[in-house]
Image (tube, rainbow, N blue to C red):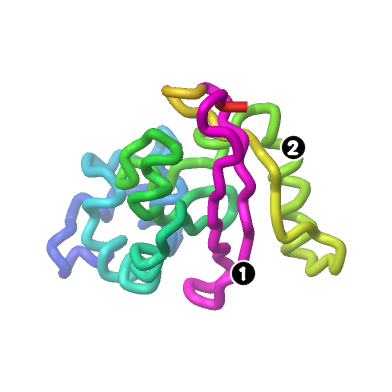
Amino acid sequence: LKSSEGHRECENCIVFKNQMKVCFTGRASKEIKCEQDCYSCQYYHKLYLPRMQFIEQIDSPAAIYKDLHFWAANSKWEELCDLPRHSMVGMGIENIYHPDSLGIVISNKKKREMKDPWAPKVDRVFIQTKTYKKLSVHIFVYPLTEPPGTWLLIGNPLDIKNGV
């Protein structure tokens, strides 16, 4: 954001200084001193949220991610992960996926980005929640054209009673 847009505090931000366009994916950095959460930011609402709001129309848990960070989530994904969706904007996947699944998620991400024809379209993974600790989920992964390089995730919990 430019200071003329009323965000003078952004001028001191390392993201602004380095001209990074997707500041919310760097929110875990201790160098970013933004006082508001990314979901409340005008920059996020103006540039990104309008292109991702279609997930609200999906009747299954749905989220958008890129570069191992979540960009948006619908209310069903919020329920699945047992986290407020506004807190997921910019959150690293390691905060959602169970450690037992991180390797396969990252490996399959690389295969998909390299356009490997054998890359799986569905990941059977575990997500960590407060309620179930380790919930088994099929995650269907679809490439999106907008925003460029993003992926749509559709979740299907496998055994909600036992969490495994």
Quadrant occupied by the N terminus = bottom left
Q: Which mark is residue 143?
A: 1
User: Image point 52% across, 36% down: which residue?
Assistant: 96
Packing grade of label 1 (10 A; few <14, some 14-19, many >=20) is: some
Query: Disc 2 marks which residue?
Result: 103
Q: Depth check: give the residue in front, 161 or 57.
A: 161
User: Image point 36% across, 67% down: which residue?
Assistant: 57
Quadrant occupied by the C terminus = top right
Which residue is outermost to the front? 161
Residue 89 magenta: no
Magenta span: 133-162
Q: Position of residue 71 (x, y in %)?
A: 44, 55
Q: Where is residue 135 in the image (x, y as percent from the top left)?
A: 56, 31
What amino acid is at disc 2? Gly
Q: Position of residue 125 (x, y in %)?
A: 66, 39
Relative horizontal placement of residue 67, taking residue 48 as reference (left or right): right
Give the secondary structure at mark 1. Answer: strand
User: Image point 74% across, 62% down: which residue?
Assistant: 112
